Amino acid sequence: MTKVLLNNRLTETGLFYKAALIALAVILASVLCAASIYQFRRVDPYVQDVLSLTGDSVQGQIIFQLNCAGCHGVSADGLVGPNLHHVSSRKSPTRIIRQVISGDTPPMPQFQPSSQAMADLLEYLNRL
Ligand code: HEC
């Protein structure tokens, strides 16, 4: 009788430790994940550089016509790629920059504009 009780206690304690360990691992993983995302957002030097520059929308329009209009339309009202009017109300500047440079959403290619060219593009997109 005592033995059985003892055994039960042991397994319960074992389970408790296992659950606690798993919970701890999950918490640790999410903290690490959040920290790395935060770090990535804050210190991406390219994004910071672009955001520190003043864009020229006329120049941005030229860059757009040459690189983007084939998919997004001459007036950015959509073709293969989506309509980009009011895109700045849907996406933050950082997300728009990532969209252009990441190549994460094929068929949209990965672009590597200079910081100034990206700032110009951003200014053009902001005015759509
Ligand atoms: C080969 C075709 C193609 C080219 C060239 C292209 N895009 Fe795209 N673009 C797309 C497609 C397709 C999507 C939709 C991607 C998705 O979300 O799945 C997209 C999405 C976007 C978005 C996000 C729109 C939204 O509503 O969330 C932005 C901003 C954008 N493109 C900007 C640009 C800019 C600026 C250029 C030029 C430097 C460019 N694109 C060139 C095809 C293209």
Image (cartoon, helix red, strand yellow):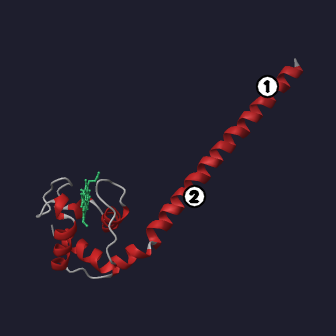
Q: Is residue 28 above or below residue 7?
A: below
Q: Is residue 115 above or below residue 94?
A: below
Q: Earlier in the sequence, mark 2 or mark 1?
A: 1
**Nearer to the camera, 102 or 17:** 102
In which quadrant of the rendered image does the C terminus lie?
bottom left
Q: Position of residue 37 (x, y in %)?
A: 48, 61
Image quadrant of ligand 1 equals: bottom left
Q: Position of residue 45 (x, y in %)?
A: 43, 76
Residue 84 appears in the rendering: no
Q: Residues within 10 Å of mark 2 (few under 14, many from 20)?
A: few
Q: Position of residue 118 (x, y in %)?
A: 29, 74
Q: Is residue 77 above or below residue 59?
A: above
Location of mark 1 (residue): 8
- Label 1 near ligand 1 (CB < 8 Å): no
Q: Position of residue 48 (x, y in %)?
A: 39, 76
Residue at screen point 73% across, 40% down? 17
Location of mark 2 (residue): 32
The amino acid sitting under disc 1 is Asn
Q: Residues within 10 Å of mark 1 (few under 14, many from 20)?
A: few
Kindly indicate the quadrant of the structure image that contains residue 31: bottom right
As measured in the structure, the alpha-carbon distance from the residue carrying label 2 to the one carrying label 1 is 36 Å
Circle 2 SS class: helix
The amino acid sitting under disc 2 is Leu
Q: In the drawing, does residue 80 fall left or right of residue 24?
A: left
Circle 1 SS class: helix
Kindly indicate the quadrant of the structure image that contains residue 71: bottom left
- Residue projecting furthest to the top: 1
In which quadrant of the rendered image does the N terminus lie?
top right
Q: In the drawing, does residue 26 fall left or right of residue 48?
A: right
Residue 46 appears in the rendering: yes
Residue at screen point 71% across, 37% down? 16
Residue at screen point 83% across, 23% down? 5
